[in-house]
Every structure is written in structure tokens, then in C-alpha cells.
Image (cartoon, grey):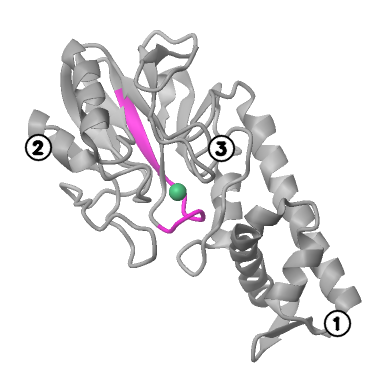
Amino acid sequence: MLEPGRPLRIGDTAIPVHQILGNNPGPMTGPGTNSYLLGDRQLVLIDPGPANDEQFSVLMRCCERGRLRYVCVTHTHRDHSPGAKALAEATGAELVGLAAPNAAGQDQSFRPDRSWQGGDVLECGDFRLELIATPGHVSNHICYLLAQEKLLFTGDHILQGTTPVILPPDGNMADYLSSLRSLQDRDLRYLAPGHGRLMEQPQEEIRQLIAHRLKREAKILDCLKSLGAVTVDELVVAAYDDVAQHLIPWAKKTLTAHLIKLVKDQSVREQDGIWSVTG
Ligand SMILES: [Zn+2]
């Protein structure tokens, strides 16, 4: 059973991987943010979560089993990265991830120790961890691959039980889809998401997520064709008629991300806030 603050060993892996659920449940975090601790002598912590005393002491206790080498963040939303700084200071661990973009909801306190990029590999004794750039949810998103276990830590790129919000202009639907497609040639056994439980059918999850986005895109185009020229507020009601009322403000953001992609594809145009199909 997964309980906040209690590490749970996950997956059938030789390298120990523990999931630690943060005590921050909510509408945007689901059960809470997952932190992951890898290894037993040399340790890597992925996504330390929010900065508070409770979270700090939970993670410090979990790290007593070995030496914390790296604190990695998948991205710098405030439910993922703010805890990194204090942990790195307390343990001497190196901070890994990309600096925050200049956008709403970003943790500007996160300062990586070097300029990391996709393809970089962290050497950590018994295991190696590869950084995979996966922009889309936000521009500075990174997934981490524990290749020898075929286990991918997906942050908010792929979630369990829900689909990620794409937040434009920093988030980008075209990038999101190509980041998903770039994972389709990888040999994967597990996905460990930033929110929700371990997933055991990675390629099926990725296929469904791409199909879901393309289906939504087709629905948006159909709605625009039948409604004619409309505002985003009018369009969201029709194109997201399957979404609960309280989630409509978030749906509007993802709808905008779809529309930006469709303009780039030259399927849609916008004038003074009014959207219509081209041709
Ligand atoms: Zn996020």
C-alpha cells in the first residue's frame, strides 16, 4: 500500500527503486507528487517535490541507506522541484535538470549545477541513468531512463489515470506529440509517473495517449467546422463536452495548445480572438 511519506519498493528490478508519495494531494496533483529513490549504496532521487519540513525529513530519512549523488528533477513545476535545493545543500548531491523557463507556476529557485541536456548520462556505481528531453507539458521537461531495468521516470509527460495538461505558450502540443513519438522506439518495461502508480504496459500507454490527443484534435476541427467562427470560450464547451465543469479552465489551456498547433499545420486561423478553419 502506498501511503504518504512511506517508501514503497516498486517493479521487479535488480536495482532497488522506491516510490515515495508526497503529502500534497489535490486537483492538479492527484494522490500527490511521486518522488523516486534509486540504488542502495549510491543513490539518485528524482523529483523531491515541494519544499517543506515534513517532506525534507521524509526524504533525508530515506537517503540514510546510502550516499545521495544526484537530485534530479523532471521539470520545475512547484509540485516537483522546490525541495531539491535544501536536499542538495544538506547532502552535497548534484542538482540535475533544466532551469525554469519564464512562465507561470515555475520554481525559479531551481538552479542546476551544470547545463544538462537530453542524451547526458549519470554514472552512479551499479547503474546509469539517461536524460531524455521531452518538451511539451512544459519546455524544460526531462524523462530519466534506467536502461538496464527498462524503467522510464516520466514526470508529468505521461501520468497514470489522467492526461497531462499542456500549458501554452511554454507548453507546446506539437512538441508534446513528437516527445511521445520519440519514446516509441525505446525498449520499455515500466513507466514510473510523477503522479499515480507504476505502469506495466509502456508502449500501449504511449499509443493510447497519442491516439487520445489526435482524437481531441479531430473533435476540435469538427466543432470549428460546424460552429463557424468562435472564441475559445465558445469552442471549449463543445470540444470538451466530456470534461467536468471544474476542469474547463484547464481544458481551455490545452485547447489553446491544440489551436496553436493547428495554426502551425495551417488547418485553423485566428483573427482578434476569433477562431475558424482555413479554406
Ligand atoms: Zn507539471
Q: Residue at x 70, y 52 (%)?
A: 213
Residue 217, horizontal then vertical, whole percent: 75, 61
Given residues 76 and 154, the one toward you in this image is 76
Q: Which region of the structure is painted magenta?
A: 128-139
Given residues 124 and 70, the one toward you in this image is 70
Observer able to see residue 107: yes
First in sequence, mark 2 or 3: give its number.
2
Quadrant location of the C terminus?
A: bottom right
Give the spatial CA distance, label 2 vs label 3.
Answer: 30 Å
First in sequence, mark 3 or 1: give its number.
3
Vertical placement of residue 139 versus 118, above or below: below
Residue 56, horizontal then vertical, whole percent: 21, 30
Give the crowd class for mark 3: few <14, some 14-19, many >=20 residues within 10 Å.
many
Q: Which residue is mark 1?
A: 228
- Check residue 136 in the rendering and tell me which mark sits there, or answer none: none
Looking at the rendered structure, the kind of residue marked 3 is: Leu
- Relative to 234, is 90 on the left or the right? left
Observer able to see residue 125: no
- Relative to 206, is 214 on the left or the right? right
Give the crowd class for mark 2: few <14, some 14-19, many >=20 residues within 10 Å.
few
Q: Secondary structure at mark 1?
A: loop
The answer to which image quadrant residue 228 occupies is bottom right
- Check residue 159 in the rendering and tell me which mark sits there, or answer none: 3
Q: Is residue 17 magenta?
A: no
Q: Which residue is mark 2?
A: 89
